[in-house]
């Protein structure tokens, strides 16, 4: 069906979602990474980037928070750009684990396979694949450049977060070496682990993440800068990965109730993609037990349901003035 929605309607519903959800309490900051435990739990920002380049920003949308697992989407796009869709499927996979993001048993259950670049194992493996292999500085520059192109502006390393994660990432260290044992690390394991830890420690704003989501929704063309960041054919690949595992073991419930592929991070950020229409990002530190921001989930779900939108609705959506 043809569906027309005006920009003012989207603005109104976003404001309503923000006002409604801001009052909600529930969840708690990630505490296994000391830096995240101390972030102000009342911060809340909501940003939308339409594929026509218009943006909506409400609340703390300029606050720089730890991108954490949302960076997995960016680096998955990077290796898709460098290797193509088939090689990423062969070397990592695109399957849901149904298990927590940092699961070690998932690696064993998936026949020694990291499953998808959007869980810790696959993301560490993805960092190992980034070219040029063997050169940490060059790899890091490529990772940051890719995120900059997707967001339309540069992220900034939160050094305190990087130190905090590096001092406590023993589980991820085990994952890196287990993957090495199964030949699923394509560079030095310590180098790959360090790049993964560093990319998780990048500070971004909800405004930036909504533009990155808008770039995916716009088939690889950044709606704000106009830059052609990646091939249009990769957009459905990355969106499918996000929809199957973006909310970890709650991904099915999320798709069922909100109808929009979205990726969360334990820093409290979520980035959601409605193909052809818009990117949405919300940020609020308190998380549910699976590690997904409570307010971000509520606000994005509110917008989708109130506007009657969803990837499974079969509507051809046009945004009007
Ligand atoms: N850096 C975090 C970790 O590896 C990211 C987890 C997440 O955001 O889901 O544990």
Image (spheres, helix red, strand yellow):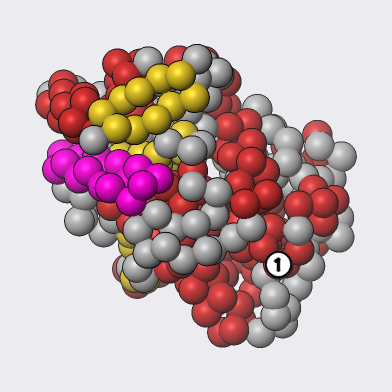
The residue at 37%/15% (across/down) is 308
Q: Nearer the viewer, residue 287 or 17?
A: 17
For the magenta stretch, what is the residue range?
42-59
Residue 131 position by quadrant: bottom right
Q: Nearer the viewer, residue 164 or 21?
A: 21
- Total numbered badges shown on the rendered structure: 1
Q: Quadrant of residue 174?
A: bottom right
Q: Residue at x 84, y 45 (%)?
A: 112
**Residue bearing the label numbered 1:** 82
- Ligand 1 within 8 Å of disc 1? The answer is no
Please say whether residue 45 is one of the residues in the magenta stretch: yes
Magenta stretch containing residue 57, yes or no?
A: yes
Residue 205 in the image: x percent, y percent? 29, 55
Horizontal side of 18 relative to 218 (left or right) equals left
Q: Residue at x 79, y 48 (%)?
A: 89
Q: Position of residue 115 (x, y in %)?
A: 74, 42
Q: Position of residue 193 (x, y in %)?
A: 61, 65
Question: Residue at image x 58%, y 32%?
Answer: 243
Q: Helix or strand or loop: what does disc 1 sit on?
A: helix
């Amino acid at each position: 069906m043809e569906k027309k929605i005006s920009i003012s309607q989207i603005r109104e519903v976003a404001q309503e979602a923000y006002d409604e959800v801001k009052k909600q309490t529930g969840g708690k900051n990630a505490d296994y990474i000391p830096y995240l435990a101390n972030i102000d739990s009342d911060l809340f920002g909501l940003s939308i980037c339409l594929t026509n380049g218009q943006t909506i920003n409400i609340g703390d949308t300029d606050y720089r928070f730890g991108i954490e697992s949302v960076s997995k989407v960016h680096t998955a796009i990077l290796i898709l750009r460098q290797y193509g869709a088939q090689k990423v499927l062969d070397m990592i996979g695109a399957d849901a684990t149904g298990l927590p993001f940092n699961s070690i048993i998932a690696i064993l259950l998936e026949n020694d396979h990291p499953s998808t670049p959007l869980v810790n194992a696959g993301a560490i493996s993805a960092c190992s694949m980034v070219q040029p292999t063997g050169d940490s500085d060059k790899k890091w520059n490529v990772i940051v450049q890719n995120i900059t192109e997707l967001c339309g502006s540069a992220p900034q390393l939160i050094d305190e977060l990087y130190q905090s994660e590096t001092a406590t990432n023993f589980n991820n260290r085990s994952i890196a070496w287990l993957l090495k044992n199964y030949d699923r690390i394509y560079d030095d394991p310590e180098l790959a682990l360090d790049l993964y830890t560093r990319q998780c420690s990048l500070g971004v704003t909800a405004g930036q993440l909504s533009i990155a989501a808008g770039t995916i929704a716009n088939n690889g063309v950044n709606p704000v800068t106009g830059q052609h960041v990646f091939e249009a054919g990769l957009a459905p690949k990355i969106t499918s990965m996000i929809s199957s595992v973006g909310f970890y073991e709650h991904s099915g419930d999320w798709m069922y109730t909100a109808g929009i592929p979205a990726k969360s991070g334990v820093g409290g950020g979520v980035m959601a993609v409605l193909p052809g229409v818009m990117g949405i990002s919300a940020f609020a530190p308190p998380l549910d037990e699976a590690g997904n921001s409570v307010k971000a989930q509520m606000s994005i779900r509110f917008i989708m349901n109130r506007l009657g939108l969803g990837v499974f609705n079969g509507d051809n959506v046009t945004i009007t003035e």
